[in-house]
Image (tube, rainbow, N blue to C red):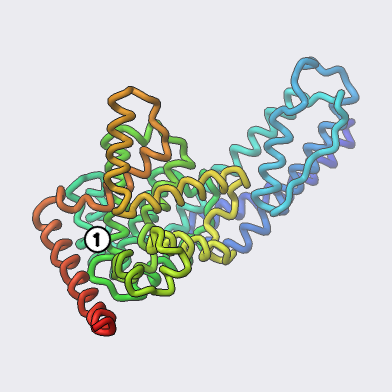
Amino acid sequence: MAELVRIRKKRLQIPISRLRSMLKQLEEKDVDFEEIKKNLDFTASLLEAVYLDGSRQCLESEDDLQQLQSDGVPSEVTDWLASTFTQRVRRPVRRSDEKPKFRSIVHAVQAGIFVERMFKRAYTAAMPDQPAEVVKCLRDVDRWSFDVFALNAASSDHALQTLFFELITRYELNSRFKIPISCLTEFLSAVERGYCKHNNPYHSHVHAADVTQTLHCLLLRSGLVHWLTELEVMAALFAAAIHDYEHTGTTNNFHIHTKSEFALIYNDRSVQESHHLSAAFRLLQNDQMNIFINLTREEWMELRSLVIEMVLSTDMSSHLLQVKAMKSCLQQQERIDKSKALSLLLHTADISHPSKPWVLHSRWTKALMEEFFRQRGRAWPTLLSFV
């Protein structure tokens, strides 16, 4: 027994030294993510091996917790460690009549908590330092009067990227869903480029940032954020950020009447909204941009379904139907479906600028008028072809 303890201590010395080295890197903000990934991979594997060895030894003696179910914490924690840091799930071999020891459970839970804290510290240390002007703007991010134009100027024309970083960090969604920073940065950069594709005066990445902030404000001020799961909050913010991705600066009717490629692809139904969704989800097919790479299959399916419903609801042709349906539910005191509520909330945020302070509303109105006039200019050649 003494020899076994000596061997275990010797095996644990290596991961302990590696973890201390990582902690030093984090404290000095000198983070090498590849090195951290390798060290965590090695440490997780070794911890798992030590746990399995300990479990086998414990099973040879009397267990004081014979009533503990076989789906106890250790297997869940080790599965989480393996799937998160090694990209594969390892399940310890255990006979149906074997029960985990209390001490093993405690150690496994402690290991899971430790790695979770390590991830949060690594993420926080790697977050880009924001200029003083950006920090000043973000102080008002919870306010209805938030000035997204000021944020865009302070962040060197990166309002959407800056705001999305801020909100998912505030909601701690980055650590909850293990979103890799490199993927998030690449994804948001690509989204901003997509919004700039047609150089729209109104439907730009600044509009997307404004809608995302407004949705956050509605969730917060209404208290709905306490009614939602973390996954639903993540889906709502994501839907707001991509809801007009690659907008062409023209209306759905313009696409339908000009028989555009988009109209033909989406059969004249929610043409723009369908493209925003398809193009944004296509970005996630690239592993370098897949911010949801660590979601379970069930989480991914739920998030995708919710985002699709929310973005499609921004089609103005469904406005009256949405309002009527929600009024009916409230009057009859029916149970409110979360997806319907969030869809109406995103639609509200999308058309909210008339309720903002005049200095913001007037600026949005001028941008929208400019975009409409551009569409009119583009429509003349098509109209003349019918003369």
| Residue 347 sits above or below residue 379 on the image | above
Name the spot of residue 289 as percent of width and height, x first. 53, 64
Residue at 33% x, 54% y is 315
Question: Which quarter of the figure is the C terminus placed in?
Answer: bottom left
Name the spot of residue 311 as percent of width and height, x first. 39, 53
Q: Is residue 364 left or right of residue 42?
A: left
Name the spot of residue 338 as percent of width and height, x first. 42, 36
Residue at 73% x, 26% y is 103
Residue at 60% x, 40% y is 114
Residue at 33% x, 47% y is 346
Numbered disc 1: secondary structure? helix
Closer to us: 34 or 149 = 149
How crowded pointer 1 is (Cα within 10 Å; few <14, some 14-19, many 20+) is rated as: many
| Residue 283 sits above or below residue 218 on the image | below
Q: Name the residue under label 1.
A: 151
Question: Which quarter of the figure is the N terminus placed in?
Answer: top right
Determine the image quadrant of residue 199. bottom left
Q: How many marks?
A: 1
Closer to us: 245 or 191 = 245
Q: Is residue 65 left or right of residue 231?
A: right
Name the spot of residue 245 as percent of width and height, x first. 39, 64
Closer to us: 26 or 218 = 218
| Residue 206 sits above or below residue 113 on the image | below
Residue at the front extreme of this rendering = 387
Determine the image quadrant of residue 340. top left
Closer to us: 2 or 306 = 306
Q: Three-letter amino acid code at disc 1? A: Leu
